[in-house]
Image (cartoon, grey):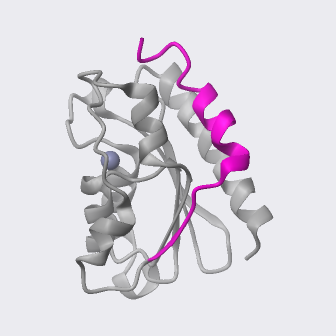
Amino acid sequence: MGEKDHIYYLKRCIEISRESRAAGNTPFGALLTGPDGEILMEQQNIEITTGKCTGHAECTLAERASQKYSKAFLWNCTLYSTAEPCAMCTGAIYWANIGRIVYGMTERRLLELTGSNEQNPTFDLPCREVLARGQKQIEVVGPFVEIEEEAAEVHRGYWD
Ligand SMILES: [Zn+2]
């Protein structure tokens, strides 16, 4: 799968993050693709509307995926996310056994956007560092600077 394909799915994640914001949640979106690149699931952030503190898009998607698919199947799937998954979401992806993560903007860039906003006091911890302490070789692809501004645009005016 080439870089252009990754951009296609990341742009869809940006759309989902826009829908998430419109639905009253924080502007984050994720999706899961299967071994052949088909989109299996999409997920908005659900933190605010459900009052669920762990309702990040990637964590919720990993939970849903683990309830529907086997770990063996998920190892050949990819989770796409607008922003680099936080430590919690990276953990959920690890436990779901999803074999690859592709993200648009770095968590550090996200931290610049959210600052210390209490709704999202972003970690400054790359997902690769979390995974380096695990026991699986989950592949991580990102960031993609060419979509970073488009991904950031969805956050404009949200965290001020
Ligand atoms: Zn998260």
Is residue 65 visible to the viewer in this orientation of the structure?
no
In the rendered view, tell whether residue 122 sits above or below residue 6. above
User: Horizontal placement of 8 versus 128: left or right?
Assistant: right
Q: Residue at x 31, y 53 (%)?
A: 125
Closer-to-camera residue (92/67):
92
Quadrant location of the N terminus in the rendered image: bottom right
Q: Residue at x 60, y 46 (%)?
A: 13
Question: Where in the figure is residue 119, as x and y percent of width and height?
Answer: 27, 24
Quarter location, residue 117: top left
Q: Residue at x 76, y 73 (%)?
A: 2
Quarter location, residue 102: bottom right
Closer-to-camera residue (104/42):
104
Quadrant location of the C terminus in the rendered image: top left
In the image, which residues are magenta? 139-160
Count every numbered label the image shows and give the total. Answer: 0
- Magenta stretch contains residue 132: no
Question: Where in the figure is residue 62, as x and y percent of width and height?
Answer: 36, 61
Q: Residue at x 21, y 28 (%)?
A: 51
Closer-to-camera residue (104/96):
104
Quarter location, residue 37: bottom right
In the rendered view, tell whether residue 31 sits above or below residue 69. above
Question: Where in the figure is residue 101, as x and y percent of width and height?
Answer: 49, 67
Is residue 46 visible to the viewer in this orientation of the structure?
yes
